[in-house]
Image (cartoon, rainbow, N blue to C red):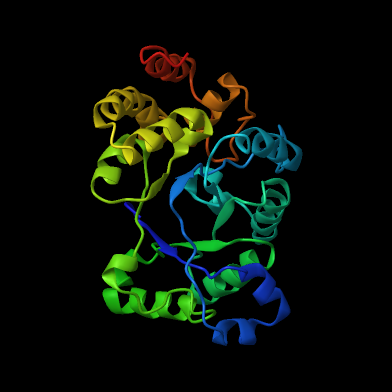
Amino acid sequence: MLGPRVWSYVRQGLSRGLSRNVGSWASEEGRKVDLAGIYPPVTTPFTATAEVDYGKLEENLHKLGTLPFRGFVVQGSTGEFPFLTSSERLEVVSRVRQVMPKDKLLLAGSGCESTQATVEMTVSVAQVGADAAMVVTPCYYRGRMSSAALIHHYTKVTRIGLLVHKTRRQDFQVLAGSAGFLLASYALGAVGGVCALANVLGAQLCQLERLCLTGQWEDAQKLQLRLIEPNTAVTRRFGIPGMKKTMDWFGYYGGPCRSPLQELSPAEEEALRMDFTSNGWL
């Protein structure tokens, strides 16, 4: 992954194996999941009273499920996972698994600050249907997160089911972490991307993927250039409040964020709209 997250490959049948017997699942020979494709990191909808709105989550998934994504990412930063309780995190994963098309992959964030909590959450997301785990790097005690500490952390996490095996260099798959450099990532050998912009411009990102895979680089470059400003707007510039506001415009449910995140000011909303209209998307 191009970015601060570490992706762990999980064998096929992860949730089935763990729900039957964690020990026997961990000892069996596994196979990597082919991650190639585009993934929207789905948002977590909230009601006006800051409760998770599972009905709106399912509505968004039904709409997103009509697009040719490889799968979905839940409990990434776009999903506001630091603001959810452990039970909410698991319920979101479970609901998404139940609603999404069966032929698509579900990648679930399971990272926590402690190694023990990360191991427990990784096992739990597997049990409720995740195909692969996304494990964020612990950062609260950043000054003590040495290479030795992080190696120990990820070794403990992967040992729960041999999620990462001894792998030859050519066996690794790389996913771009942003739509802003998706074309460049494909040109350098990436196999797909986890792109927040796919929550509103999913068809266009899948089109960019096809252009790259078929070598239509000139057309791909033209499309990529039109995606850079909107992507920056819903990520670095306006963040999740900007992402959710844009979803409202494009026929999805964005709704409010959970506190302490605040809604956009009128000036910010106008600037956000301009980034999309000036590139022909609104």
Is residue 216 shown left or right of residue 6? left
For the view shown, which residue lies furthest in the right direction? Answer: 55
Residue at 61% in and 70% down: 14
Position of residue 198 measured from the top left corner of the image (x, y, whole percent): 48, 35
Residue at 49% in and 63% down: 33
Residue at 36% in and 79% down: 166
Q: Which of 231 and 255 is in front in this view?
A: 231
Position of residue 218 measured from the top left corner of the image (x, y, whole percent): 24, 26
Q: In this view, does 143 lie above or below 232?
A: below
For the view shown, which residue lies furthest in the front direction? Answer: 214
Position of residue 260 measured from the top left corner of the image (x, y, whole percent): 54, 40
Residue 239 in view of the camera: no
Quarter of the N terminus within the rendering: bottom left
Q: Is residue 51 above or below residue 256?
A: below
Q: Is residue 209 above or below residue 6?
A: above
Position of residue 71 measured from the top left corner of the image (x, y, whole percent): 55, 48
Total marks shown come to 0
Q: Nearer the viewer, residue 137 or 155?
A: 155
Is residue 4 shown left or right of residue 37? left
Residue at 61% in and 61% down: 130
Residue 170 in view of the camera: yes
Q: Which of 265 and 15 is in front in this view?
A: 15
